[in-house]
């Protein structure tokens, strides 16, 4: 299934059929519930695109390289979607994190993340609704909601480079979030042991606008870069300018890749 999902022709076939809309109606009314091994934490599937997300996070452990063996007591998940990274992280650490900030601009995904935290009694985590990677003086922004929630973004759809859309894109206005302000509001001066960034094309802007917070407060970053918006070399250079070294890249496809960075300048 994962390998098929890397081919544009497969996405064209799915886009030509009413699969997504029908599956979405059924799954939102009758979600599929699963348990994570180890730990037994519960998650639910409410859309068809989450089938591949499930395989990547829980079956292939695609974020495993972000765990360096040191204790992760605090984390931030940008582009948290339904909150599954938090569940995966909690299940794979010897000691659960003591504090976590989750951020997403998709209203339904925010409600799903809140459901997962409540269902699994993860009271040490906070979900915030809003978009990141925008100018500090910007209050609101237009957010494009795709039929596949994982493709939703503040960046406009680019049909020549992105995968075919499985239905209609709708726009909503969402608040702009300052991650540094939200972290300080909820967790004070605590250091962030791990930050996950999956914000569909806004990653370079985020590093630019919140570079000071990254440099002073974040130890490690696992980042998904979107190749129609930014190159790995651009990200390497921008992150290097604030003291981060690339440690590993993996899970590359024609559209995206994952990279791990370590703060070697101010935080050890």
Image: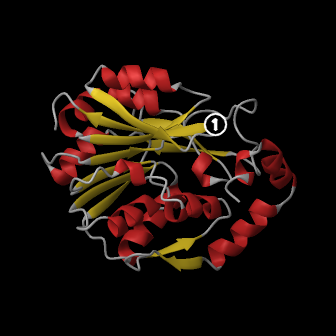
What residue is rendered at 29% in x and 48% in y?
194
Visible in this render: residue 137? no
Q: Quadrant of residue 155?
A: top right
Residue 260 percent location from the top left of the image: 39, 39
Visible in this render: residue 109? yes
Q: Quadrant of the N terminus?
A: bottom right
Residue 201 percent location from the top left of the image: 53, 34
Residue 245 percent location from the top left of the image: 31, 29
> Residue 183 vs residue 226: left or right?
left
Pick the front one: 30 or 211: 211
Q: Residues within 10 Å of mark 1 (few under 14, many from 20)?
A: some
Residue 159 percent location from the top left of the image: 75, 33
What residue is rendered at 28% in x and 57% in y?
100
Residue occupying the far left of the picture: 189
Pick the front one: 193 or 127: 193
Q: Tag 1, which secondary structure?
A: loop
Residue 257, relative to residue 234: is it above or below? below
What residue is rendered at 44% in x and 75% in y?
37
Q: Quadrant of residue 97?
A: bottom left
Q: How many marks?
A: 1
Q: Quadrant of the C terminus?
A: top left
Which residue lies under the disc numbered 1? 255
Pick the front one: 35 or 21: 35
């Amino acid at each position: 299934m994962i390998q098929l999902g890397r081919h544009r022709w497969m996405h064209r076939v799915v886009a030509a059929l009413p699969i997504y809309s029908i599956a979405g109606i059924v799954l939102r009314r009758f979600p599929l519930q699963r348990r994570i091994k180890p730990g037994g934490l519960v998650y639910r599937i409410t859309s068809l695109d989450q089938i591949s997300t499930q395989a990547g996070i829980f079956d292939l452990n695609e974020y495993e390289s972000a765990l360096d063996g040191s204790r992760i007591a605090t984390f931030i998940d940008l582009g948290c979607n339904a909150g599954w990274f938090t569940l995966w992280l909690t299940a794979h650490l010897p000691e659960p994190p003591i504090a976590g900030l989750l951020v997403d601009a998709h209203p339904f995904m925010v409600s799903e993340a809140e459901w997962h935290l409540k269902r699994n009694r993860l009271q040490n985590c906070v979900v915030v609704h809003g978009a990141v990677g925008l100018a500090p003086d910007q209050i609101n922004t237009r957010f494009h909601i795709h039929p596949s929630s994982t493709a939703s973004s503040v960046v406009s759809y680019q049909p020549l480079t992105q995968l075919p859309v499985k239905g209609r894109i709708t726009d909503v206005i969402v608040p702009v979030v300052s991650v540094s302000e939200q972290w300080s509001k909820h967790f004070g001066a605590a250091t962030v042991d791990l930050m996950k960034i999956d914000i569909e094309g806004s990653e370079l802007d985020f590093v630019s606008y919140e570079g000071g917070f990254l440099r002073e407060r974040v130890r490690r970053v696992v980042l998904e870069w979107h190749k129609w918006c930014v190159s790995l070399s651009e990200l390497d250079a921008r992150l290097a300018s604030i003291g981060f070294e690339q440690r590993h890249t993996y899970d590359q496809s024609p559209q995206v890749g994952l990279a791990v960075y370590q703060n070697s300048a101010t935080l050890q």
